Each structure stands twice: as structure tokens, then as C-alpha cells.
Amino acid sequence: MSRVITVGGAQMGPIARADSRKAVVDRMLALLDTAHARGCDLVVFPELALTTFFPRWWMESQNEVDSFFESEMPGPDTQPLFDRAREYGIGFYLGYAEKTVEDGETHRYNTSILVDKDSNIVGRYRKVHLPGHAEHEPERPWQHLEKGYFEVGNLGFPVWRTMGGVMGMCLCNDRRWPETFRVMGMQGVEMVMLGYNTPAANAVGPEPFHVRMMHNHITMQAGAYQNGTWVVGVAKAGPEEGCDLMGGSVIVAPSGEIVAQAHTLGDELIVAECDLDECTFNKTTIFNFEAHRRPEHYKIITEQVGAVPPPEE
């Protein structure tokens, strides 16, 4: 008996710095309406879906930075999204900037949540692989201040058994690190959802667009194939406040094949019927971890951070 989840990847076009949460949520509601019309069970929105990609700017005022964060979820501006999803019986993944108090201290994370068909938050992930830099670098055409505005996630890479399968989450730069997928793969993940905001150009050096897009897709395809999982990668896309975002949202099968791909740089819903039972072949053959992994030879991965070549003779 197959376990089919109809998944919608809700790519979003540019969000201006001055756009209100209501204006953005209205766009998300329109995508949710389309997803309902197309029979989706689950919708994946991008990273930092409620605002422009604000780490692009150096801001000296913490209050100004905090204006892009959510201190509750759902809050007044996002409650309509939860209400509409509950009405339709659709689960969703949402990326946003989270401001929270833990043990009496304020923390800020680049976060995603997984919401089930009853609009209950069943999973939370905080971005582990923060790219960019922490201090102002005025020589850049735009900033990438994730290391300055967010803390490294403190939840690891958990998975959740919900909506008929084993679900996992990550965010943007996480997709470039094979450890992301493998840690979830070791927990039997069957669908990895990830939102991203990736510039079409590299701010610090020449890198052709087609190469950047290849890297975008190949990391997700490799993660899917090597761990026998579906991967749903959903972008913010198009010219956003002077920075072109690459788009290229995809749904990838456990075989590593792209089965749905966005063809615009705007608000667009891509849809695929994802049979979670298709994960079984890879998980029980070439990537049967129990039969073939040799962790005694992998210790360097967790014991060492940077690469250390052998000494010169």
C-alpha cells in the first residue's frame, strides 16, 4: 500500500523591506488557496518567508533588527495562515526569524516550523550552518550578516513522525553540508523540507549563475539519493531590494531525480505526488546503513572542524 503525500512547493517572489507582514501573508494565503485547489496535503514555504532577506543590510540598532523577528508563532499577523490551513486540512513548513526567551535570556534564530493538518506546531528546527559574516563589510555589494543576527541553532537535526511519514527540516546553507541529510537519514527520514534565500551572484567572487544553480540542485539531489528521502527545496526568488535571488525551487525524489521545478522568479506553486514508500528501495539496498556503514572510520567528521593535511616532507 503506497503512502502518497501531495506536496506543494510555494516559491515566493521578492519581498520589499517595507512590505507589511499582512501583505506577505496575503500572498501566502493565495498560494495556499492554489495548493488546496490542486489537492495538496502539505505546503513548503521559503526561509524567512515573512520578510525580505534582512541580513542583507547592516543595522546598528537592535530594535531595527528585531522588527524582522517574530516573538510568537502564530501571532496576529500569521494566525490567518494557520486558520486557512486548518480549514483546508493542509500541513505546512514555514521559515521565519525567531526571537525567544529561554532560561531568562533572549535568543534569536533562523527557524522553521512544521505544522500539521490541524494547525498544530509539531516540529521546530533552528538553522545550524549559518553562512556569511558577523561584522559590517562595506566592500561587499550587499551584506550577509546571518552570523551577526542569528545564533547557531541549538536543536540539532531532529525528525518527526507526522502526517503519515518521517519528516525532517533544514534551511538554506544546511543543504550544502552532507552531514545535514545524513543525520536525518540515520533517523529514517522520508521527506526533508528546506527553504532558502540564495543570491544569483556570489558577493565575494566570480561564480557563473549556471554553476550556482547546479550546486543548488546537486546538493539536494545528492542528499535525497544518498539517504533515500524526498527533498522539497523552496526558494525566495527574483530581484529583491537590489539583490537577485536565484529561485529554482524543486521537489526531488529518493532516486535523486527532480520531479517538479519552478520556471518563474515569482510566486509559484510546484506540486508532486510523493510516495513515501519510494524511499524503501535505497534504504534497503545500496544505502542500507545497517549493512554497509563503517562508523569506526568516520570519527574525524565529529572530532575535527577544519581540514588538516598531512605534514610536508
Image (cartoon, helix red, strand yellow):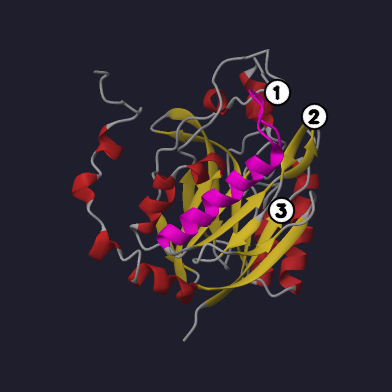
Q: Earlier in the sequence, mark 2 or mark 3?
A: 3
Badge 1: residue crowd in 10 Å (few <14, some 14–19, many ≥20): some
Do tag 2 and tag 1 residues touch (Cβ < 8 Å)?
A: yes
Identify the residue at image location x=57%, y=64%: 257
Q: Earlier in the sequence, mark 1 or mark 3?
A: 3
Find out whether residue 18 is within the magenta segment.
Answer: no
Q: Which span is picked out in magenta?
A: 200-227
Which is nearer the eye, 87 or 299?
299
Seen in the picture, residue 262 relative to 216 is either above or below; the reply is below
Do tag 1 and tag 3 residues touch (Cβ < 8 Å)?
A: no
Placement of the C terminus among the 4 image quadrants: top left
Q: Secondary structure at mark 2?
A: loop
- Residue 15 in sight from this viewpoint: no
In the picture of the structure, the residue carrying the numbered disc 3 is: 11
In the displayed structure, does residue 103 sit left or right of residue 169?
left
Query: x%, y% of residue 161?
Result: 42, 66
The amino acid type of the residue labelled 3 equals Gln
The circle drawn on residue 212 is none
Which is nearer the eye, 9 or 75?
9
Q: CA distance from mark 2 to mark 1?
A: 8 Å
In the picture of the structure, the residue carrying the numbered disc 1 is: 142
In the picture of the structure, the residue carrying the numbered disc 2 is: 242
Find out whether residue 218 is within the magenta segment.
Answer: yes
Q: Earlier in the sequence, mark 2 or mark 1?
A: 1
- Residue 299 in sight from this viewpoint: yes
Query: x%, y% of residue 306?
Result: 35, 27
